[in-house]
Amino acid sequence: MTSVTNRNVTTKTACAIAQAAVDHAGNLGIAINVSVVDSSATEIAFLRMNNAFLPSMGIAKDKAYTAAGFGFPTMGWKDILDGNQQLQAGMVERPRVVTFGGGVPIFEGDILVGAVGVSGGSEEEDIACAQAGIDTVFG
Amino acid sequence: MTSVTNRNVTTKTACAIAQAAVDHAGNLGIAINVSVVDSSATEIAFLRMNNAFLPSMGIAKDKAYTAAGFGFPTMGWKDILDGNQQLQAGMVERPRVVTFGGGVPIFEGDILVGAVGVSGGSEEEDIACAQAGIDTVFG
Amino acid sequence: MTSVTNRNVTTKTACAIAQAAVDHAGNLGIAINVSVVDSSATEIAFLRMNNAFLPSMGIAKDKAYTAAGFGFPTMGWKDILDGNQQLQAGMVERPRVVTFGGGVPIFEGDILVGAVGVSGGSEEEDIACAQAGIDTVFG
Amino acid sequence: MTSVTNRNVTTKTACAIAQAAVDHAGNLGIAINVSVVDSSATEIAFLRMNNAFLPSMGIAKDKAYTAAGFGFPTMGWKDILDGNQQLQAGMVERPRVVTFGGGVPIFEGDILVGAVGVSGGSEEEDIACAQAGIDTVFG
């Protein structure tokens, strides 16, 4: 065996996820940025709601990168880092790694095919928008 | 007068433009990256077709930045730079400035509201995809 | 609806704000850098007092970016981040995001039209200079 | 002798130069970005006219840097580089070095005290705005 196979969200799927996340944010009355990446953390779709926080653009993209890169929700870092000060300080410093909620991996069955990152609301709202996006396709 | 007014593409408009550009690329049998920015060159929508050239992601984003920043198609640089060697050499080196075709400004009437940047095909194909995107909303 | 409308400080307004902030700093006997950006966080005016701290140039610009990008004073981050260690660590690391005082948004009525960032004095002095700048136009 | 003395434009002078350059641009019917730096190429004043070309912000700042750094107008590079292909290719590649017109050094008597960089119009218009700025103080 000389190669491995990766599975990745299509452009159409990524766009549908981003649009559903934006629709959910609209229902919550908030403005978000949402990025959808494939399993190699390459951006496939991005949407920004007018007047969403500007610095949140990069945060959304980095949450998607982190969730795709580690394969678990960025919210999961809380438990890992609590009580390990060296790891906490070190991970937070890593470029593009986000250790608070709003990045959620996308699984097709049990295969990682990408991730969604949302930023613009509270951690809970960001997570809800990301999940609404995923559920519209894989729910 | 303490302020001026700017107009910017909505998220829905930007997403429709990006999707129409992708559809046009599909019809041409090519794979593109497309970025849609507002009049301040802030990215509002981005779509990447699976297997489009990876370095073309940044080229698409920078074409959109250049077209929004100068207010004319990036193809227009050809005539401006021909015969002015210093300016030509200098502009090509500017960060994020792209001086070949594929970035097209979006006008609502005669007001600049954003720009589209496409990269992945030939200059002619990239321009055609960008224009197809704009035409789907403003045509 | 294919576009939204944004309002932005004029060059004349931004310059008057920067000059008034510098005058206030002179009265306080301190030397500051002051940056005024529009609602898209694009710099419209910058002034540096001779011998003001050099690294404060970037801090002033980033405070203006942060205040315009989030729409509230950078001083407001204190309450948001207290008690949320992951978010605190993460926000502090974000490029260009400043989570201490001296960045103040500019509102015309209830519309965000830009922001001022001041650095060179204490947090209280920086905020006072930024506010003096805004008050000279919108007070 | 353990130290040397440098002379630099004051904040008030730099601001007056930038404002006069902007006024001249207004008379010409163009929109510019203008940066004024001191003799160490540190930015002292910057003004951006609303809707001036966005990429010209960095070009204006870099023209001021280049003119202060070399002590002659950026337009002077044309004659130096013509016919020396290696030097031309090399200088154009240098970060922040601009080899076309619009950067003009500021002299007080025969002492370099700073430089102005203008971008937004043609080379001739940019130079005229920079010179109008300098003339308002030193003319």
Image (cartoon, coloured by chain):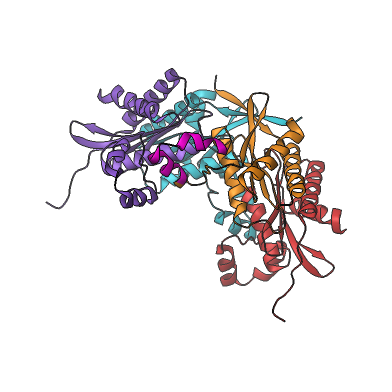
Chain colours: A red, B orange, C cyan, D purple
Query: For this view, does D52 lie left or right of residue B33?
Result: left
Q: Furthest residue to the right?
A: A139
The percent position of residue D131, horizontal first and vertical second, equals 32, 26
Main secondary-structure element of the magenta-colored stretch: helix
Residue D21 in the image: above or below residue D116 = above
Q: Residue at x 34, y 49 (%)?
A: D91
Note whether D101 is above or below D87 in the view shown.
above
Q: Nearer the viewer, residue A114 or B60?
A: B60
- Name the spot of residue B103 as percent of width and height, x first: 61, 40
Foreground pick, A43 / D50: A43
Is residue B70 shown left or right of residue D13?
right
Instruction: Tell me what residue is drawn at x 65 percent, y 62 percent.
Output: A99
Where does residue B46 sit, x and y in percent of width and height? Answer: 68, 47
Extreme-bottom residue of the structure: A1
Q: Quadrant of the C terminus of chain B?
A: top right
Q: Nearer the viewer, residue A69 or C56?
A: A69
